[in-house]
Image (tube, rainbow, N blue to C red):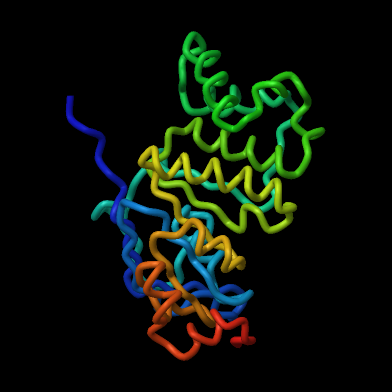
Amino acid sequence: MRPPVSDLPLVFDGVSALARDVTLVRGVSLQVDAGAPTVLVGPNGAGKSTLIRLAMGLVAPTSGRITWGGRAETDGQRRAMVFQRPVMLRRSVAGNIGYALHAGGIARAARRERVADLLAQAGLAHLAGRPARRLSGGEQQRLALARALARDPEVLFLDEPTASLDPAATKAVEDILRAIAQSGVKLVMATHDLGQARRLAGEIVFMLRGSVREQSGAERFFTAPATPEGAAFIRGDLVI
């Protein structure tokens, strides 16, 4: 059998996006390769979330081109996304994952074992029968991760996945993200939390005013940023 065609590298070539005459992303050229997590950092309004939504096809570029593995058109089946506040279906915890498997075309006979595996990975096996909307915020985020993994994605996008969580819930989510990355799934995550970026990133993309200002290894960014704005952001200064 031929190996599946990869959606990586993800390449933005001069991509801009406008909404009601406001520029959200301006002339972004960026390549995201397989490997350790790529973390997007920058102040609020820098364009991090828009860049992720462009990649997922939730926002259309006004100009420029986005390609996946050298292809402009893909079916999107090999990528998934988790939002800051995921929507829970009116089903049980297990039912949320089962629905995602059904939507992905997984045969009924294979779903039960896959649901059990994903629940175990998310630390939610003991809550399988609970209504998903009765979970805590951290539990819902872990369920959202499990539900996204039901698609068996090559690339998983995350938009501020722990922004509203307490430290214990944040650690639980980060532990799952590390395991996902170690399994070979490419993580691309936007976060405002520099501590989280230090803990998880292999690569940093620093954005400001809709543009990419730096792209480098995480250690290099945090020890020797290439721009004054990057250095100021790391110090905690207001960067606008």
Residue at the limit of the structure toward the top, as seen here:
109
Where residue 152 appears, as percent x and y from the top left, is 43, 33
Judged left or right of residue 169, residue 63 is left
Q: Quadrant of residue 219?
A: bottom left
Residue 172 position within the rendered picture, expressed as x and y whole percent measured from the top left: 63, 43
Quadrant (top left/top right/bottom left/bottom right) for the N terminus: top left
Residue 36 in the figure: left or right of residue 170: left
- Where residue 92 sits: x, y (%)? 73, 23
Q: Residue at x 53, y 38 (%)?
A: 148
239 relative position to 17: left or right: right
Name above or below for residue 142 compared with residue 195: above
When asked about the image quadrant of residue 154, the answer is top left
Q: Quadrant of the C terminus?
A: bottom right
Looking at the image, which residue is at 26% across and 52% down? 69
- Which of 88 and 37 lies nearest the eye of the viewer? 37
Outermost residue on the bottom side: it is: 228
Asked whether 60 or 154 is in front, the reply is 154
Question: Residue at point 32% right, 70% down?
Answer: 13
From the top left corner, tell me how far across and down residue 216 is, in percent: 35, 71
**Above or below for 16 versus 54:** below
Q: Is 87 left, or right, of 224 in this rendering?
A: right
